[in-house]
Amino acid sequence: MEKFVYDFEEGNRGLKDLLGGKGANLAEMTNLGLPVPPGFTITTDACREYLRTGEVSARDEIEQHLATLEGKMGRKLGNPSDPLLVSVRSGAKFSMPGMMETVLNVGLTDESVAGLAAQAGGDERFAWDSYRRLIQMFGKTVCGVPGEEFDHALDDAKHARGTRDDVGLDADALKGLVGTYKEIFRRHTGRAFPQDPREQLDLAIGAVFGSWNAERAVLYRRQERIPADLGTAVNVVAMVFGNLGSDSGTGVAFTRDPATGEKGVYGDYLPNAQGEDVVAGIRNTMPLQELEQLDKRSYDELMAIMAKLEEHYLDLCDIEFTIERGKLWMLQTRVGKRTAAAAFVIATHLVDEGVIDLDEATKRVNGNQLAQLMFPTFDLSEEPEQLTRGVGASPGAASGKAVFDAQHAVAMAKEGEQVILVRRETNPDDLPGMIAAQGILTSRGGKTSHAAVVARGMGKTCVCGADELEVNVHKGQFTVNGHVVSEGDVISIDGTTGRVYLGEVSVQPSPVVQYFEGTLDPQADPLVSAVHRILAHADERRRLRVRTNADTGEDAARARRFGAQGIGLCRTEHMFLGERRALVERLILARTAVERDAALDELLPLQRSDFIELFRAMAGLPVTVRLIDPPLHEFLPPLEDLAVKVAVAEERGQDPGHDKDLLDAVRRMHEENPMLGLRGVRLGLVIPGLFAMQVRAIVEAAAQVPDARPEIMVPLVGAVQELETIRAEAEKIIHEFDVEVKIGTMIEVPRAALTAGDIAQAADFFSFGTNDLTQMGWGFSRDDVEGAFFWRYLELGIFGVSPFESIDRDGVGRLVRIAVEEGRAARPDLHFGVCGEHGGDPDSVHFFDEVGLDYVSCSPFRVPVARLEAGRAAIESTGSDSR
Amino acid sequence: MEKFVYDFEEGNRGLKDLLGGKGANLAEMTNLGLPVPPGFTITTDACREYLRTGEVSARDEIEQHLATLEGKMGRKLGNPSDPLLVSVRSGAKFSMPGMMETVLNVGLTDESVAGLAAQAGGDERFAWDSYRRLIQMFGKTVCGVPGEEFDHALDDAKHARGTRDDVGLDADALKGLVGTYKEIFRRHTGRAFPQDPREQLDLAIGAVFGSWNAERAVLYRRQERIPADLGTAVNVVAMVFGNLGSDSGTGVAFTRDPATGEKGVYGDYLPNAQGEDVVAGIRNTMPLQELEQLDKRSYDELMAIMAKLEEHYLDLCDIEFTIERGKLWMLQTRVGKRTAAAAFVIATHLVDEGVIDLDEATKRVNGNQLAQLMFPTFDLSEEPEQLTRGVGASPGAASGKAVFDAQHAVAMAKEGEQVILVRRETNPDDLPGMIAAQGILTSRGGKTSHAAVVARGMGKTCVCGADELEVNVHKGQFTVNGHVVSEGDVISIDGTTGRVYLGEVSVQPSPVVQYFEGTLDPQADPLVSAVHRILAHADERRRLRVRTNADTGEDAARARRFGAQGIGLCRTEHMFLGERRALVERLILARTAVERDAALDELLPLQRSDFIELFRAMAGLPVTVRLIDPPLHEFLPPLEDLAVKVAVAEERGQDPGHDKDLLDAVRRMHEENPMLGLRGVRLGLVIPGLFAMQVRAIVEAAAQVPDARPEIMVPLVGAVQELETIRAEAEKIIHEFDVEVKIGTMIEVPRAALTAGDIAQAADFFSFGTNDLTQMGWGFSRDDVEGAFFWRYLELGIFGVSPFESIDRDGVGRLVRIAVEEGRAARPDLHFGVCGEHGGDPDSVHFFDEVGLDYVSCSPFRVPVARLEAGRAAIESTGSDSR
C-alpha cells in the first residue's frame, strides 16, 4: 500500500517532490538532531488524490502518526486539561509565498482553552487569544467565512475597550470576542464551530490541499510555470509559542549577509511574539546580535545550529525560529535567497573555505544575476529619500519628471525632458508614452504585467506593482506614505531593486562593466574579483564559443574586451542609414540598369571601409557578415507621411516635386506584410548586382586586412536553390581574390529548418535567426504583438515568458533540433551558431548547448552572460557535482 | 561490363529510363514486328558518363552494333557507291520537345553523295540537297557554327536563281551551295568538314549527349521539374526518305481524334516530303484518308498497324511514318496527347470496348482536365477570326478592348470598359493593370512567366508567349499575320487553348457545369456522360471525403449540387462586411464594455440568421464554422486614405469630425504585419465577448435547424493553452442548449504542427490551413510575393510551381505529416481535414490522401476536381492496374 504520511524522522531533503520544500527540510533538520517541534508530513500524492476524489485518504495513517506525535509531546489532541495543539501548514515543492493556506492552533475547543491557559502558567488572555485566532483562521480558510466580518468584530471590540491595539484586549474581552466569532461562524456555515479536534484537523488538511487550486494559486503557477499537477504537501506540527512572555520570542536569521554575501550574523529577533506578529509589523524587531544579551544559551545554540546548517547545506541558509520559555525551536530552513552580488561573493567565499569547488560555484550563480550587475546603479551614498518599493520588472536606473498620461509623456519628451511614465497599469494605448519615457512606474501588476513585458522588450527601466502608490491620473499626482508627487516632480526608479526615490539620484557605473572595460582591477573589489574568477572558470569549462552581434568597429572592439570570440552577426543594412540613405533612394528609384549600377558603385567603397574597420577590430577572429535583409522600402519615408505631404502640397497649389516620385515608389513597393515580403535572399535574387556589390566590398576589405576571417551569411533562405544561386554568384567574385570566405545561411524560416538536410549541401555554416524563426513559427511579429496581447497571454499562462525573451523549446526549439540533426547528418563538418537575441538569454544558452550548436552570438553587453551560462551548461551536462 | 548500346530488338517500352521514350517505343514496335528502320540506342548511362568525362565511351560496342545495322541494310557507312546513312536523334525519358539536338543524313561525304544519287535512281538534286542539309545541321549542332550564316547563304543562292523556294534550286545550284557551306564550316571551325563518316557519327553522338546541358534544356527541365541527372539516350537509325518521288511521303496519325476522342482515322499526309518539310509548312498536307487513293497497300498496312498499336498500348497512340517508294516505315509512336474532353471520352470508350476497366479509365483523366472543362468557352460556331495562338497560361474566355499600358487599363476599367492588357511581357509595375483587366495577353514567356503566374494566382484569363505578335507599346498597337490591332479594338483570348481572336466572341456555358447544376442530362452529350461515369466511379473508390469552403447559403447549395459532403470552412468575417461594417466600427471604437457589448448584441442576430441559412443548405452534413480570423482594423478604411482626408480637411480649415476618431483608431490599431498580428484566436482572447457572441449565434442557429451539424473551428492556434481557454468559454455556452458541437482548430501556424500532440488534447478535429501554413513556413505573404518575385523564382527553378498552387511536400507538407502523425498518436479519434486552397489542387489532393487526412475542403467549383482526384489517389494507392 502506498505510504501517504511521513514522520519528520522518515523524510529527508531529497524528497521535495513528495514532501514539499518545507516538509523535506524539516525532516532534514530533525535527522540532523536539531530542535524541530515534532510533526509529520502528508504527501503531495495524498493531495493529488484529494483533488481527484475530494476525500482525504489515509485517515488511518494520519491517526497513527498523530498518536506518535501525541506520544512524543506527552499531550493529546483535545485533552481538556493538557491539550496538544498543532499547526497545519502547506508546503509545495516550489515556494509559492502567500498563495496557499495555513491554520494554526488546531485542537483548541471551548473545553481545552482552559487547559491551554494552564499550560501557559495560567495565562487566560493568551489562551483566549489563541482560540479566537483559530476560529478566525479556520472560519476563513476552511469554511469560506468572509474575513472582514471577523475584522469588523475585532475592531468593534477594540473600540468598545477604547484601545487601538490587540494587546489592549484582556481575557474577558477576548472571551466575548470568541462568542461573537462563533456566531459569525454559525451564521455563515449553518453549523456550530466544530468542537471535535480531530474534525478540525481533517477539515484543515482538506482545506490546505484544496487551496492548491485556489484562483490566485493557479494564476501564480501559470506565471511561474509551475506544473499544475504537483499538489502541495501538508505539515502537521506541534505548536510552539513565542508569545509566552519575555523569555519567549521569534526571529529570522541568515548564515551570511544576503545583501553583500559577507560572513557574519544577520537576522532579526522580536521578543514575546509569534511569527505572524513580525509580519504584521506591530513592533520593531531588534538585530539578532542583541539576543546574545537576552538569552545567551539560546543565542549560542542558534549560532551552532547555523554553522551546522551551512556545513550541511554547503550554502547560505535562512532560518525561522521560535524561543518558547528559553527553549529554541527551529521552524523552517532553506537555502536562502540572496542578491546578485551576494551570490557571486558567497560562491567564491565557499570555494576559498574549501566547501565547494569552482564548478559548483559557477552553478550557484547565473547570467541573470550577472546581467543585473552590469546595469548602472543609483549612488545610494547620497542617501536619497525612498518613497516606496515595488517589483523590479526591468532593470536599470532612471530619473525623470513624473508624468501620468502617455500623450503628455510624448509631448514632454519632444521638448527634451526626461520623463517617468506613472500609471496604475498600462495598456496598449500607453505604448507611445512608454517609448518616450526613461522609465515606467505602475502601482499594479507584477513581472508579467503589460508594463513589465513591454518594458523588458524595449530594454526600458520599469518598476511595477508599487501598491502603496495611490495614482490619481485626473489630478496628475500620486500619493505615497504621506508624500504627494505631482506631474513635473522628479522621481527616480531602480528597475533592479524595485525602489522608488524622490528627486534625481546620481547614477554610478557598474564596477563589473568597468572591470570588463579594463578600467578596474579585479582585485580592487570583492564582487569584481568573484565575477572574474567565476567567468574565468566558465570560459575554461564551456564548449560553446561566444560571438557578438556588432555592426561597427566600436561595438566590435567593446565586445572583444567583453570576451567575444568573433562576430556572429553584422547587419549590413545598418550601413545603409544616415547620409547613405540618399544612395539607397537612388538605387530604388533607378529606372535603368545604368542608374542602378551607378548607385551600387557609390555604395561599394562605403561598405568596404565599414568592413575594413570591423575586420581590424576582430583580426584573427571570424566575422560573419549578413547580406542585406530588410525590404528596401524601409529606407524610404512612411507612406502615410508622404501621402499627407503630397496631398497638402497639392491642396495648396504647390508642386510636390520629388516627394511625388518618392510617393509613387513607396506605393509601388508597399507591402502589406513587409516581414513576409521582398527581403533577404529574395532581394539578392531579384535586384541585379545588389548582393554582388556587398560580396565585393567584403572580399576587397578582407584582402586589405591581415588576419581577416570573413564569413558571408545569406538571410531568409527557405530552399537550397536560393542559396545555390547566390553562392555561385558570390564564388565568382571571391575567386578573383586570394581570400578564403565561408558562405553560410541563416536558418530563420521554418522551411529552412524542415529542409536543412538539403540546404546543408550548399552551406558551410548555419546560423539560427531565432527572432524570425519565433515570429514565423508562432505566426506573430514582435513589433505588433508584444504590446498588443502578450500581457494577456502571460496572464492566461499561455506562456510563462515571452518566446522572444527565452526560446520556446517545444515549438521553435524543435525546428532548431531538426535543423541541427539533419544538417549535421547531411554534412558532418557543418558549423552551427545562433545570432537571434536568444543567444544572450541564459535559459536559451543551455538549450543551444544541449542541441549541440558551436557558438552563440549576442549583443556586446550580453557576451559575459553567455560566457557564464555556456560554462554552467557545460558543467551541468557533464554532471559534475562537488557535494 | 555495363551494356551501353541496345539494338532495337533488345529493348522494350519498359526501359524508358535507360533508352529514353523514343528508343523504348522504337524497340517495342520492332519487337511487335512492325516495319521500323533498323537501328540501335545508346543509353542514358552512356550520356551520364559522357557528361562526366567528355568522352563517348563504348566505342567498341557502337562499332559492333553499327556493323549489325550495316548487315541488316546491306549497305556500309561511307561506302562511296552505296552508302548507309543514319540519323542521330536525342530521346530522353520525358519528352522535351525541341530542346535537344538531332543530326540527319550522317554518313554523306564528297564521295558518297554520288552513291546516294545512284540509290535514288540517279536523283542528283536529292543527293546534293541531303548533303547540304547534313553540313548545315552538323555545323550548327555539332560544331556551333552560327545557323544564320547558312541561312544567308541559302537565301543568296535562291536570290541568284530568282526563286523564293528551296525546290527552285537544282542540283548544280545545290552543289555550289555545298561548296559555300563547307567554306563557312572551315571559317568557323578552322578545319574541313569531316569526310570520315565514322567521325561524323561519333561527333554527332557527343553533340546530342552534350545538348542535355544546353541552357534552354536546363531551363526547361527546371521549369518542368525534370531531374537534371537523367541524361538523354541517342538513337542511331537507318535513314529512310519520303522525298524520293510521288510514291514516297511522310505523315502523322492518331488512332482516335485527339480533339474529341471519337473513333476514326485522324492524321495528315504529305507526298514526296520529309518530316522537316511538314514542320516548315512549305506545302499543305492532305487528310490521311486520301492516302487510300494514292497508295492503298501502304494505307491498309498503316490502318492495321494502328489497330495493332492501340491493342498493344491500350490507348490512343500517335505515330510518325514515312513511305519510301511504296514501302511504309514507322519512325515513332507513343501514347498520344489529347484535349481534356478527348481524355474523358476515350477513357470511357475504352471501357465500353472492354479494353480497360473503370479504375484505369479514372487514372487516364485528371482534375486539371476536368477543371478546364468547367470553364465557359467561346462559341466557335460563330467562326471568329483567329489572329494567332499562344500558350494557354490561365484558363477562361475573355473579351475586351486591347490596351497596352497598365495605367490606361486601370483608367478604362474605372469607366466600366472591359479591357485585355496586351504587353510584350509583364512585370510587377503592371499589377494594377492586370487586376483591372479581364485578361492578359503577352508575346513572350511561357507558363511560368510573370504574367502567367500572377494571372493564375488571380484566377484571371491569360494567354502568354504569342510570339507572332509584334507589340508596339508606344504606338499603342500590335501587328500579327498582317492584322494591325490598335488600342480600343476588341479582341478575345482563350486561356485554355491559347487562341487569340479578333472582335468579341460569344461565350457559352460549360456543359459539364450545366450537368452538375442539374440542367443537362448526362446522356445528352458524350463528354458529359463520360464525366458522369468516371466521377461516379471516383466517388465509389475514394477514401477522402470532399467538403466545400462556403460562406453563404447560395454557395453551400451549389457546392452540394457539385457533390460537397459538408462545409469545411465557413469564414465568418465575410459576414462582417457590407452594411454590418458600421457595427464592427462601433465595436472597435467602443470605449466601454457597455458600448462593446451593445455592438456585439446587434451582431448576434445577424450572424445567427447567416448560420441558419447555411445549416439549412447543408442539413444532415457537417458545417465547420471558423471564428473570426482577420485583424479588426481590416474593417476600417486604410490609414493612408484617412490621413490624407483628415489632413486636407484641416488644411481647408474644416472639422474632420468622425474621420479624426477613425484615424486615431486606425493609427492605434495599425500593425506593421497584420498577417502576424492581433488576429484569430488572439482576438478571442483579448476582446471580451467577441468569440462568445459567435459561438452563441452558431448554437442558437443550430438549435433552430433540424439535422444541423455545426463544428466550431478556432483559427491561428499555436499553443494548446489558447485552444483550452476558448474551448472552456465555448462549452459553457453550448451546454445551455441541447446541441452537439465539435470544437477543433486550424493548424496553420508552424508551431501548431510542431506541438500537435499537445494541441490534440483539446481538439476534436484539425483542419490544415495550408495557405497560412505556406505563408509562415516559407516566410512570405501571398499578396506581397506572387507579383513581386515568384516569376523570378519559377524562372530560376527555385520552385516548379507556386507553393500556393500545389503544396510544398518537403517543407510545408512535412509539417502536415508531423501534425497528423503526432495528433493521431495522441488522440486516435481525431479528425483531419484541409481547408486551404490546396484542397482543390490535384497534386495536393494525392498528398492529403497519402498522409491520411479524412477530408479536403475547397471552393464549390473545385469540388468535382477534388472528388475525381481523391478517387484517383485511392486507386493509385491500392495499386489497381487493369493492364
Image: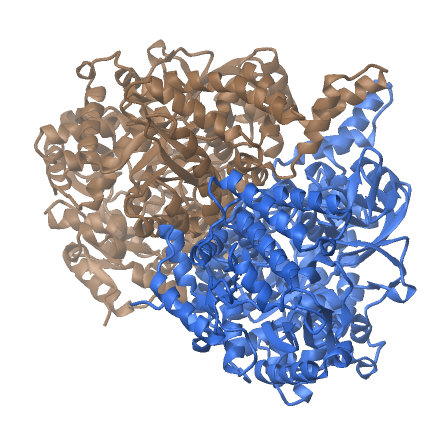
Chain colours: A brown, B blue
Q: Say how many tags the image has.
A: 0
In the displayed orientation, state which residue is furthest to the left.
A354
Q: Is residue B852 above or below residue B762?
A: below
**Horizontal relation, residue A659 to residue A829: left or right:** right
Residue B863 visible in the current orientation = no
The x and y percentages for residue A631 are 57, 32
**Horizontal relation, residue A820 to residue B295: left or right:** left
Q: Residue at x 28, y 44 (%)?
A: A829
Q: Quadrant of the N terminus of chain A?
A: bottom left
The x and y percentages for residue A602 are 54, 17
Decide which of A215, B313 is in the foreground and name it: B313
Q: Residue at x 66, y 33 (%)?
A: A669
Quadrant housing residue B622: bottom right
The x and y percentages for residue B525 are 81, 79
Q: Is residue B143 above or below residue B18?
A: above
Decide which of B510, B590 is in the foreground and name it: B510
The x and y percentages for residue B283 are 77, 61
Q: Residue at x 21, y 47 (%)?
A: A25
Decide which of A196, A229 is in the foreground and name it: A229
Quadrant housing residue B428: top right
